[in-house]
Every structure is written in C-alpha cells, then in structure tokens.
Image: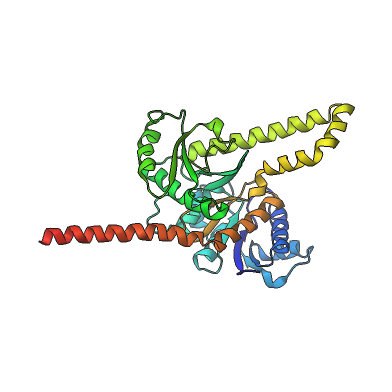
Amino acid sequence: MGEMLNVALDAMGGDNAPDEIIKGAMQAMEKKQNIKVFLVGPEELLRQKCAAYTYDASRLEFVNATEVITNEEAPVSAVRHKKDSSIAVALGLVRDKKADAFVSAGSTGAVLVGAQMIVGRIRGVRRPPLGVFIPTTKGVSLLVDNGANVDARPEHLLQFARLGSVYFENTMGVKNPRVAIVNIGVEEEKGNALVKATYPLLKECPDIHFTGSIEAREIPLGGADVIVCEGFTGNVILKLYEGVGKALIGEIKGGLMSSLRTKIGALLIKPALKGILARFDSSEYGGAPMLGLNGLVVKTHGSSKAKEVCNSLIQCLTFKEQRIEEKFRELYQGEEKAGEEKAGEEKSGEEK
C-alpha cells in the first residue's frame, strides 16, 4: 500500500467549494488507500456534507476553520489577519509536520503568500515557482514558472530551471530532461534583457540539460521537457493553452454533431478521439506545486471540480514517494557546503 500520505485540503477554496472539493477527496481516498485527508473548514458544515458519503473515518479528519479568504481580498493582509481561515489553518498543518502536503483551489495570491509566510522556503531558494504539467504531442512538459513570480531576475530563472529539472526527472522518470527558455526566436542573441541575461547562466549550469531557446509554437509539440520563463509569460502561455484547447474541443464536437453523416463518423472514431481528448484535458494532471518549500503546496484551478481535486491529491503521493522535497534540499545544501568551504579557504589564505 505504501507509506501514508497526510494531505491538508482547503475545503472552502474555489468556485465549487465545498461540494466538489469534498467529492474529490472521497474519490482520491477510494482510489488510493494510503491517502489521509485533513478536511479544513467549518467543521459542522463539512460533517453535514460528508454524511452523504460512505468513507473510511480513520482516513478523514475534520479540522475546524471559521474564516474564508476570498479572491477579492489583498493576499498579504488576508493571510496576516485571517489566522483562522481555511488556507492559513491548513498551511499550519504542513508547517507543524502534521500534514505532508496542502491542496487548495482558493485565492492564488493568498496561497502563494501563505505558503512562504507559514510553510517557508528551503534555505537557498529565493523565489519558489509554480510548476504545472501541460499536455504535448510527446506526453507532457513542465511549465515553470506559471504565475508565482510575475517579475524575476536571471538568477531566479536559473533556480526555476534547476528545481523544475529535479521535479520532472523524479515524477516522469526522464533522466536529464531537456530544459529550454521561452523566447521569440531560437538564436542565442534573440530575446529581451531578462532572457539574454539568463541564457548564459542556463548554458553554463552543470545541473541541467539546457537545449537553448524555445518558441511558443514548439511547446505543444513537446520541444522541451522543462520550459522556463518568469510567471507573467508562463501564466499567459498557460491560459492561452487552456483557452485554445477548450475552443478546439468545442469546435470538433460541434462539427461531429452537425449532420447525420458526421454523427456516424463520430461513432466510428469515438474510441480514438476519447483517448486523445483525455490526454489534452488539463484536469488529468492535477494542480501546480510550488517548488522549493519546506513542504508541498499545490494550487489547483479556482474552477476545479472533483476530478482535478482528486488528481491533485494523488499527485502529492508521487512527490512524497520520490522524496522530491529532500532532493530539492540536497541540491541547495550541497551548494551551501561548497560556498562555506570556499569561504574557509579564502579566509585561510588571508591569514597566511
């Protein structure tokens, strides 16, 4: 069965809370026997909602939280003042090591701010990015950052690449994943000031397999495994990706249902088409983990329904089983040790 995973789930976050959040939790516990959920929110309400389900009571614990942070509130102020919100209480469970992971479809700003204020960063990580799997014709790619840091410096993008490479390698089982930076051309001299300054850092980094620049049109074709950019660009790519995908699926379905002939054709191709559409369904891949924290924080879409919540919870299992947080820590502990040794050598040289 594997080691038990304890997940703090924000039951009140998102457009479809708490019903779809609870439904997703029930589905995840049914699929995986080694998931325990701490359901965080108004306890009485949550107990009433859960009464409609049959579940293993030993793997579902209710944690009372009387407040909810909305999307309209300023994230920093909300996290500081709403100490009993479902987001703050759930993140506190991760900080106190009572839970291995936190999942929320709630306010993105509050989750990002709360994650750093309450859970904290691994020492050496400057700007934890969000990394999300996006479907491609070759499988999936990891887009990092996709919204946590709308402004970033070259050294931040270098960290995104290193963290993303470790995450992709250990979740997808791909050794030395291909890392590329989003650009407006493949030539090394192309790009804005940020890309031009970051390119040589990535090129010289021994920890990653850097393949150069990638243009947006190559992303759906699987042109790289780990796609690096600052959060503004990443979020635009992600939203456009989802919008175009939704539009295409709608057009295909509409075309197939437009006449008797196309309906007959649709029946013939339905099995193959169903598989293809499933591969390009973003809810299949769970949420976006924030990489480089002292615990796992996963942000799912605000519009998430049960399926995405379920997959986000299951996604946390891989993170724990592959010891990804520990590997992030080892990456930066080694760096700190090397820095301390170098400083010691320099001091010794000065004394001589």
Q: Residue 326 at what x, y percent from top left? A: 47, 62
In screen coordinates, is 267 left or right of 351?
Answer: right
Name the quadrant containing residue 90.
bottom right
Tell me which corner region of the image, top left, top right, bottom left or bottom right, holds residue 19.
Answer: bottom right
What residue appears at the point 48 percent right and 53 percent down from the top-left corner?
166
Residue under the point 41% across and 61% down: 330
Furthest-right residue in this view: 260
Q: Residue furthest front?
A: 175
Q: Is residue 190 above or below residue 80?
A: above
* Label total for image: 0
**Percent from the top left, x then y, of residue 136?**
61, 39
Image quarter in which the C terminus is found: bottom left
* Residue positioned 40% across, 54% down in the render: 125
Residue placed most toward the observer, 56 or 188: 188
- Residue 108 left/right relative to 124: right
The percent coordinates of residue 197 (x first, y second) are: 35, 36
Residue 265 rendering spot, x and y as whole percentages: 84, 31
Residue at 42%, 43% in the rendered image: 157
Q: Quadrant of the N terminus?
A: bottom right
Q: Is residue 153 visible?
A: no
- Looking at the picture, the colour scheme in use is rainbow
Give whichever of 152, 270 is nearer the camera: 270
Residue at the left extreme, as displayed? 352
Q: Is residue 236 above or below residue 53?
A: above
Outermost bottom residue? 58
Res 346 visible: yes
